[in-house]
């Protein structure tokens, strides 16, 4: 088996199991958990880059104001996505959060059309229309849009758009984003500690260790994903990515007993049909292109 498939599979499985990790830290507020994730990620990435002697990229980047501004924007989107997801998991919205990552590939298609002037094929438009119908159904039945799902999809889609157009590797890019967020996280945690409101200070040893592990838990799947993406086709990577929201959905329904009735089934079913249509069309074009090339 192509090792890239294994790397990508492991990355998406780890991301899919994130609800278990964040549920274990339910006594820590979402904002404090987010700050710890930034701090320990920065320390972990510092060690990784130091061991690999991979700091030469930083000097030119710090002199490039436009690149810094772009990564400051991507850091804001990433932290917003992280914070919302952590809150959603511990507020009992794992199922709705999983929908955001099912929708995300189609949001990427629309962003490519709107911002990168990519042309959409008819089947892609049909897939987008089906997904929109699913969202409208959920909005009509619930009396409000699935805002958690949409916010997660839009923030991660926007993050992906900025990263796609910024020439910096996955490890270096995450390090720069974390570096920009690190001072804010340290100040926030310091203020909480000074006011006696730090959940970390009062937590058990096990909870403290879990918070420290936020560093490798954040960085390792990203490194696995980057290694996998370099070794396999984008179409295959696109299919494997559905492991993450599928695991999250199963955890939400089967383990944490979140509701998933007929209303959600119809709405999610329309979105799943859209994803199936989009994925099959992409695979067909890859295969057809190979045959023509042969």
Image: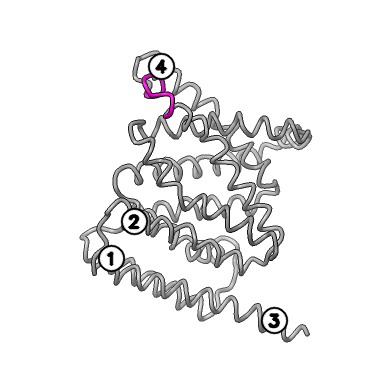
Q: Which mark is residue 264?
A: 1
Quadrant the C terminus occupies: bottom right
* 134 w.r.t. 93: above or below: below
Among the 4 quarters of the image, the one containing residue 282: bottom right
Mark 1 or mark 2: name the one nearer the start of the chain: 2
- Is residue 70 within the magenta segment? no
Mark 3 or mark 1: name the one nearer the start of the chain: 1
Label pair 3/4, CB-CB below 8 angstroms: no
The alpha-carbon separation of the residues under discs 3 and 2 comes to 37 Å
User: Pointer 2: what residue?
Assistant: 95
Mark 3 or mark 4: name the one nearer the start of the chain: 4
* 284 w.r.t. 173: above or below: below
Mark 3 or mark 2: name the one nearer the start of the chain: 2
Question: Is label 4 in a helix, a strand or a loop?
Answer: helix
* 186 w.r.t. 102: above or below: above
The alpha-carbon separation of the residues under discs 1 and 2 comes to 10 Å
Question: Is label 2 in a helix, a strand or a loop?
Answer: helix
The region drawn magenta spans: 199-206
Question: Is label 1 in a helix, a strand or a loop?
Answer: helix
The alpha-carbon separation of the residues under discs 3 and 4 comes to 59 Å
User: Pointer 4: what residue?
Assistant: 193
Label pair 1/2, CB-CB below 8 angstroms: yes
294 or 69: nearer the eye? 294
Q: Position of residue 265 (x, y in %)?
A: 29, 69
* 164 w.r.t. 182: above or below: below
Residue name at image x 47 percent, y 32 percent: 210
Of marks 3 and 2, the one in the foreground: 2
Disc 4: CA contacts within 10 A as few (<14), some (14-19) or many (>=20): some
Disc 3: CA contacts within 10 A as few (<14), some (14-19) or many (>=20): few
The alpha-carbon separation of the residues under discs 4 and 1 comes to 42 Å
Q: Main secondary structure of the magenta part?
A: helix
């Amino acid at each position: 088996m192509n090792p890239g498939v294994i790397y990508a599979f492991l990355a998406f499985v780890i991301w899919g199991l994130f609800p278990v990790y964040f549920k274990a830290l339910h006594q820590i507020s979402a904002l404090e958990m987010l700050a710890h994730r930034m701090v320990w990620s920065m320390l972990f990435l510092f060690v990784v880059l130091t061991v690999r002697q991979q700091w030469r990229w930083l000097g030119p980047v710090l002199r490039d104001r436009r690149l810094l501004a772009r990564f400051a924007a991507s850091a804001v989107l990433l932290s917003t996505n992280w914070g919302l997801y952590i809150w959603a998991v511990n507020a009992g919205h794992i199922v709705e959060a999983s929908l955001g990552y099912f929708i995300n590939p189609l949001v990427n298609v629309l962003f490519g059309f709107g911002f990168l002037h990519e042309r959409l094929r008819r089947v892609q438009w049909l897939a987008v229309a089906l997904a929109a119908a699913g969202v409208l159904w959920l909005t009509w039945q619930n009396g409000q849009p699935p805002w958690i799902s949409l916010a997660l999809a839009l923030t991660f889609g926007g993050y992906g758009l900025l990263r796609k157009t910024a020439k910096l590797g996955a490890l270096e890019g995450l390090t720069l984003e974390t570096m920009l967020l690190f001072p804010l996280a340290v100040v926030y945690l310091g203020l909480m500690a000074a006011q006696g409101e730090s959940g970390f200070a009062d937590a058990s040893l096990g909870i403290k260790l879990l918070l420290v592990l936020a560093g490798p838990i954040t960085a390792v799947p990203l490194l696995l994903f980057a290694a996998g993406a370099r070794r396999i086709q984008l179409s295959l990577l696109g299919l494997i990515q559905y492991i993450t929201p599928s695991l999250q959905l199963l955890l939400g329904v089967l383990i944490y007993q979140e509701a998933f009735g007929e209303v959600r089934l119809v709405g999610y079913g329309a979105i799943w049909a859209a994803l199936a249509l989009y994925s099959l069309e992409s695979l067909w074009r890859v295969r057809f292109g190979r045959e023509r090339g042969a």
